Image: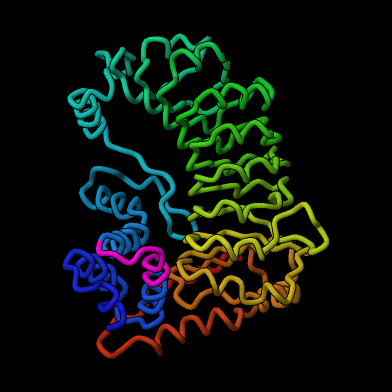
Amino acid sequence: MEILKKCKGLPLAIKAIGGLLASKGFYPIEWENINNNFHELTMEEDNETSFVMASLQLSYKDLPKLGFKYLSELISRCLVEVAGPDMDGKIYNCRVHDLVRDLLIMTVQDEGLGNFDEKGKQKPTADTLWLGLSSEIVEGKSLTTSPKLRALVLMKSGSKLHVDKKVTTRYLNSIRVLDLSKIELDTSQEDLFDWLSCLKRLACLNLSGVTGLKELPSSVEKLLNLQILVLNGCTSLSKVHPSITNLKRLIILDLGSCPLLKSLPQGIEKLVRLQELSGLRLVKQDDNKSCKLTELGKLMDLRVLRINICRETEISENELELLSQLKKLKVLSIDTEDCTDHEISEALGLLYPPQFLDELYLKVYGSRFMPVWAINIVLVGASSSPRNTPLLPMSVVVQP
């Protein structure tokens, strides 16, 4: 009734908020969060337009990421085949049948996204919007004919990248997506990011598994429109420059599986749009240059969090219930690395995630006992579920 009053009898506002509430089920804490957020959005201006915009804004911000849903649909229709799920049941590798590939090529040509020769190899033209290269980029010859290019994917693992700043400045002004995963870097990271900094409209950068990338330099801050940055599996990466905190539009920051990276720089709290953060290693409290758990308290849009706990991890008293304040958090993964049974119990016993998690992963977990809060989350979900309402679809995966 409180939410309804705030809609001021405006049909569009009522429909938008009604649809949002329906997606949450009958969980009081979820409705209370919506009620509080709606109040904050409508405090600045008291007019009909502000109330409608506030309801639409809430509905828009709560939209899930739908990638997995679409992928599942493609698999169920036999358009995509699963190459093999990981230990946690997630799908990380896929493949397509030869006939499906022919269909994809035909569709891409019909929609003007790219052109292919008689052997099925992509042939860049002046109207090409998407380009996948299965060979090395040599002096940018493959790029000079495609000034409208929006996405560039280097599909051959171990390819060497020869950067050419002149080619970048002249021919890649429109590029939004750049996938250079698993390339072999034969230049310095400074030269690489000096080249990348010319891509002013770049929104997604995938450098996962790049061989030879040891540092994320200060020039990364020039990518002001970057929304997705993936460096997962960069086994040589040991340092991330603090200037990364200037990328205010970042939604996904993935630094998982980087064993030499001991910590993230202080100031991650500035990335208030973050929805997914992977690779945060919790360190000692006296380390003034590293990101602490307390910084996450300002990342209120965080939906996916993957953290690492090691023997040096220290959790202060004011951080005990910090994770529980992240109301939108749905997926939590904790890697306990080299901790002993006692150290795992002591460290995890101090963390209290939100009650309405969908997925919980405990990786490299050597303890014989589950944290008390993990059991409580399941019990609270069951006790708060009204009669005839299904329980929360929470899954707990423990990987020893």
Please name the residue shown 61% across and 72% down the image.
322
Please name the residue shown 46% across and 86% down the image.
379
Instruction: Identify which residue, 309 or 91, lies in the foreground.
Output: 309
Residue 313 percent coordinates (x, y): 75, 65
Residue 14 percent coordinates (x, y): 21, 70
Give the answer, above or below, for where 396 lies relative to 121.
below
Give the answer, above or below, for where 21 lies relative to 116.
below
Please name the residue shown 66% across and 79% down the image.
349
Q: How is the image coloured?
A: rainbow
Give the answer, above or below, for where 336 lies relative to 109.
below
Q: Is residue 269 left or right of residue 35?
A: right
Please name the residue shown 39% across and 28% down the image.
151
Quarter that holds the C terminus: bottom right
Q: Is residue 314 left or right of residue 34?
A: right
Count up the numbered dots: 0
Q: Is residue 307 left or right of residue 146?
A: right
Magenta range is: 38-48
Q: Quadrant of residue 306?
A: bottom right
Instruction: Identify which residue, 116 or 29, lies in the foreground.
Output: 29
Question: Residue extending furthest right?
Answer: 286
Q: Quadrant of residue 387?
A: bottom left
Give the answer, above or below, for where 218 lies relative to 360.
above
Question: Residue extending furthest front?
Answer: 46
Residue 64 percent coordinates (x, y): 35, 58
In the rendered image, residue 44 lying in the magenta stretch gets the answer yes
